[in-house]
Image (tube, rainbow, N blue to C red):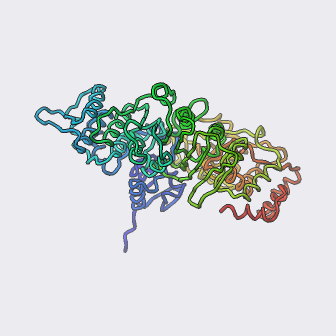
Amino acid sequence: MEKKTELISLRDAAARLGVCRATVHNWTRLGLLVPAEAAPFRFAPETVAAFLRSRRDGEGAKLTRRANKSRSVARLNRGRFRKAVGCFRSLHLALESAMYAAVLKRLCREGEAEFREEKGEFVFLRKSVAAVMAGWCSRLKCPLDERMLRFLRTLPEMEDGESLGELYQALSSIGRRAVGGTYYTPTALVDESLSFGCGATRYLDPCCGSGHYLVRASAVLGLGAEQIYGIDCDPIAVELARINVLLAFPGEEFTPRIFRGNALTGRILRAEYGTFDFVATNPPWGGAASEGEESFSLFIHQALRFLKAGGRMSFLLPEAVLNIAAHAPLRRKLLESCRIDVIELLGRRFSGVFTPVVRIDAVRTPAPAEHHITIRHDSGREERAQHLVTERADCAIETGVTAQERAVVEKIFRCGGITLSGNADWALGIVTGDNARLLTFVPEPGAEPILRGGDVLPGCLREPRCFLRPGRLQQSAPLRFYHMVPKLVYRFIARRPVCAVDRGGRLTLNSANVLIPRLPSWPIELVARYLNSRLIGFLYVKRFGTCKILRRDLETLPFPSLSEAEAEELLRADDAAWEAELSRRFGLTEAEAQLIAHSLP
């Protein structure tokens, strides 16, 4: 008899993958990791092993950046650096000391340095390199010692300019990178972005990190060392960038024009070096924000100040920048001060980030009335008249929407009606701040059932399979909202609204939010059915086009006015009659109703 493979628990799968249980469950919900059994989840060991290999190879790594990652202390064991990471941990070496040693290894490989064993010191063969390394060494709290040399010997060959950046990320904690919003940018994306600056003579990366863009600028744009400028607030990254740029120009003596500081102040470069004709970068996403704007938004505003008239800029950004209401001021600024030439939808391209990526190429000059924005994606290309986008109150840039679909969306919104704005109470799901400690998948004394996004289905709720232990929470609405009966619970991560009525007064995790509607003559069951309808799904996908269900978007959806008798009749209608009645109330033709029916899976 063939021996049956023994399955492993969710806890064991998380341990093998080096993540928390909540992350594994999220991958499962997204269909990235398929369990052999559900309720409770159990996995085949070979499935987990294959998924781990795909993550290491950079394929299928679609982790969401969530609040709990800021507390993570796990470190990336990236393939060839695994031995070095282990040595780094065992020696309790300071991160900057480890990177200084790694740079020494790279310089020796490139013939820029030699180790003189009789004196126990490194000698640098280029004055420019010696100056940078001497300045860096003077900042280190401890000089070159045996621990640093032991770490250096465990390192693999640092054969290219990307090695230092990859090692830096491997040694830096996941939590540190998630807080700063910084992730390694694939070279292909860098080169595509830089190619928009063809002909530039002065290039700036205002958040250069270890200098990936700067090094590639010398190759893609053919710029000399004196034409390339970078700035970053991370002192280690600045030193790495200086060395990487020096190595990009072998044999030349120069001081890299890379500075430590906050480019958002604009004082360091603009005061001393004037403006630039090209700015390109992948700014931090989700980093420190100011006045309601995310860090990438602030970097774009500053790039516009650094650019001379007619200068070009190319930024890699989260796709949500195109249509999320919070980014409307940024879109208006770009549309009114720039000619946006190309918007390229790139999909999910960063290992460790679930958010799709978009590249925006723009020129700092007013767009002529006839100018059209080119939108490129896997399915082809679209054109959008820039002046029409600017005329919209939210300046949203729709993608993947045909002219017919756009006309239907506008027709429905023109019909008007009542909305949830001012007619509902809202509550975000609980953010524990420490899922591993506060959540359990086994009932325990004192632990309360808690609904997650995956428990919410169109019109019904699964019984909670997760329980919240008592403890201090990072974020929670007043308990009365969770214990309200009845209430609507809707998924936070979804392309279209998915909601159900909760009559059990249960808690919700941050993947499931709470809505308590107060619409005249709309019973809560009918509100749920309306939000789950095909028509609202169409509206949401075509108007907002995000993977998040946001309150501000839900509050714009039009609800037809109903009498109590009409509401009761609609509650009894079957699905076909229900969708037909919605089409009738919004004055849709049969062709328009069929367009909605066939536009969504």
Q: Nearer the viewer, residue 231 or 79?
A: 231
- What x and y, as percent, mark residue 597? 73, 63
Residue at screen point 84% across, 59% down? 584
Check the picture and name the quadrant holding the N terminus.
bottom left
Check the picture and name the quadrant holding the C terminus.
bottom right
Q: For residue 588, which quarter of the picture? A: bottom right
Q: Is residue 340 positioned above or below 97 on the image?
A: below
Direction from residue 542 to residue 195 in the image, left or right: left
Q: Is residue 437 visible?
A: no
- What x and y, as percent, mark residue 180? 47, 36
- What x and y, as percent, mark residue 317? 54, 44
Q: Which of 547 and 315 is in front in this view?
A: 315
Residue that lies at the very extreme toward the bottom in this rendered image: 1
- What x and y, as percent, mark residue 359? 54, 48
Q: Can residue 376 be seen in this view?
A: yes
Direction from residue 3 to residue 147 in the image, left or right: left
Q: How many labels does the image show?
A: 0
Residue at screen point 41% across, 41% down? 214
Q: Nearer the viewer, residue 103 or 421?
A: 103
